[in-house]
């Protein structure tokens, strides 16, 4: 019986020592949330839920860097801001590809996302596909979105903590 008590005593001490280690104080902050607003040229919201002529359920985000091709981006969620405008929030889900300028303490990644606007029967709207290029920066203390391009035009270039609200205007 003494053997078991000794074994469990050692196991308890081991768990106590490993569970009570001091925190090294280094935490990585993650800042990668992007809100996409879709509107027409008059500023009208295109993603009103339950609107039969709207695009709320007909916008698809496709991971352009996925090795399987035509893969839908997971992690897109609808939301409504304080001004009652609808948006689609992206946090993560697309493939991130490392760029060659990376070092041990600073890395750069890119994601490419295609946005498709699916038509319904008798719909006369033709909306061109959009391409997003999202560039991420990584350091041991911060992972964040550093820039966003929409169809080759930079629409965000900012610092950590800055709100990333991207408005896409369609005809």
Image (cartoon, grey):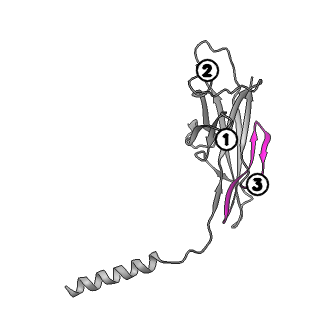
Q: Which of 122/163 is in front?
A: 163
Please identify the quadrant where the N terminus is shown. bottom left
* Residue 159, disc: 3
Report the residue at 60% width, 37% height from top.
Answer: 79
Given the current orientation, which residue lies at the most extreme left position? 1
Q: Is residue 38 magenta?
A: no
- Tell me the SS state at disc 2: loop
Q: Is residue 145 magenta?
A: yes
Percent position (x, y) of residue 70?
58, 35
Percent position (x, y) of residue 45?
68, 27
User: Which residue is labeled 1 in the image?
Assistant: 35
Q: Picture quarter containing residue 71?
A: top right
Report the residue at 70% width, 39% height from top.
Answer: 132
Say which of marks 1 and 2 sits in front: 1
User: Which residue is labeled 2 in the image?
Assistant: 119
Placement of 40 over or under 154, stated as above or below: above
Percent position (x, y) of residue 113?
66, 39
Q: Which of disc 1 and disc 3 is earlier in sequence?
A: 1
Q: Are marks 1 and 2 in contact (CB under 8 Å)?
A: no
Q: Which residues are magenta?
A: 139-160
Q: Picture quarter containing residue 137?
A: bottom right
* Separation of marks 2 and 3 at Cα, in angstroms: 37 Å
Say left or right for 7 vs 101. left
* Separation of marks 1 and 2 at Cα, in angstroms: 23 Å
């Amino acid at each position: 019986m003494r053997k078991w008590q000794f074994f469990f005593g050692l196991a308890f001490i081991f768990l106590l020592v490993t569970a009570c280690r001091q925190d090294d104080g280094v935490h990585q902050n993650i800042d990668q949330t992007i809100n996409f607003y879709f509107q027409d040229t008059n500023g009208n919201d295109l993603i009103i839920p339950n609107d039969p002529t709207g695009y709320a359920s007909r916008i698809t985000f496709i991971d352009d860097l996925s090795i399987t091709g035509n893969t839908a981006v997971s992690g897109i969620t609808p939301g409504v801001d304080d001004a009652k405008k609808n948006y689609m929030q992206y946090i993560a889900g697309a493939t991130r590809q490392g760029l060659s300028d990376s070092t041990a303490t600073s890395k750069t990644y890119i994601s490419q996302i295609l946005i498709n606007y699916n038509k319904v029967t008798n719909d006369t709207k033709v909306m061109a596909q959009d391409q997003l290029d999202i560039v991420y920066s990584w350091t041991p203390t911060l992972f964040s979105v550093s820039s966003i391009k929409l169809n080759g035009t930079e629409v965000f270039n900012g610092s950590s903590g800055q709100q990333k609200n991207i408005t896409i205007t369609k005809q």
